[in-house]
């Protein structure tokens, strides 16, 4: 089963960029499809592969920040090639 996950990591303290950069670089280093924009990062692939990666990398990201939020949306389909039809 393929999924699409949208992630927004929001550290709640100053000097937050290193933690976000590290998190995104770790996602990029996976064999999964990863897209980024200024507001979020999307990861696409097999459910087990995506969730295994996210379990490890979310924990690592939380260990690098004092306080923070992670917003996550999961869609049960691979929306990597989505293009609006309007």
Image: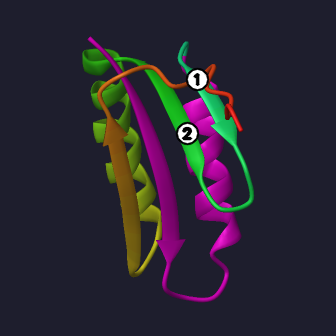
Q: Which residue has dot 1 on it?
A: 80
Query: Which residue is drawn at the image coordinates 42% and 38% (left, top)?
Result: 5
Magenta range: 1-30
Depth order, front residue of 26/83: 83
Which coloring applies here?
rainbow
Label 2 residue SS: strand
Position in image of residue 82 (x %, y %) = 61, 26
Tell whether 15 sits left or right of 62: right
Query: Which residue is drawn at the image coordinates 47% and 51% (left, top)?
Result: 7
Say if the magenta span includes residue 9.
Answer: yes
Position in image of residue 36 (x %, y %) = 69, 43
Q: Nearer the viewer, mark 2 or mark 1?
A: 1
Query: Quarter of the image holding residue 33?
Result: top right
Mark before the other along the chain sequence, 2 or 1: 2
Query: Which residue is drawn at the image coordinates 55% and 12% (left, top)?
Result: 31
Query: Quarter of the image holding residue 74?
Result: top left
> Mark 1, residues whose alpha carbon is within 10 Å: few (<14), some, or many (≥20)?
some
Give the quarter of the figure containing the C terminus: top right
> Mark 2, residues whose alpha carbon is within 10 Å: few (<14), some, or many (≥20)?
many
**What whole-number distance in Å separates the C-alpha atoms at marks 2 and 1?**
9 Å
Residue 79's place in the image compared with 24, above or below, is above
Position in image of residue 27 (x %, y %) = 55, 34
Give the quarter of the figure containing the N terminus: top left
Tell whether 52 sits left or right of 58: left
Residue 12's place in the image compared with 52, above or below, is below
């Amino acid at each position: 089963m393929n999924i699409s996950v949208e992630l927004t990591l929001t550290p709640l303290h100053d000097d937050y960029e290193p933690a976000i950069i590290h998190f995104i670089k770790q996602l990029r280093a996976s064999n999964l499809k990863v897209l980024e924009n200024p507001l979020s990062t999307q990861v696409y692939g097999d459910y087990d592969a995506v969730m295994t990666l996210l379990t490890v990398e979310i924990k690592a990201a939380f260990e690098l920040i004092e306080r923070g939020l992670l917003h996550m949306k999961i869609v049960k389909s691979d929306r990597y090639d989505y293009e609006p039809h309007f």
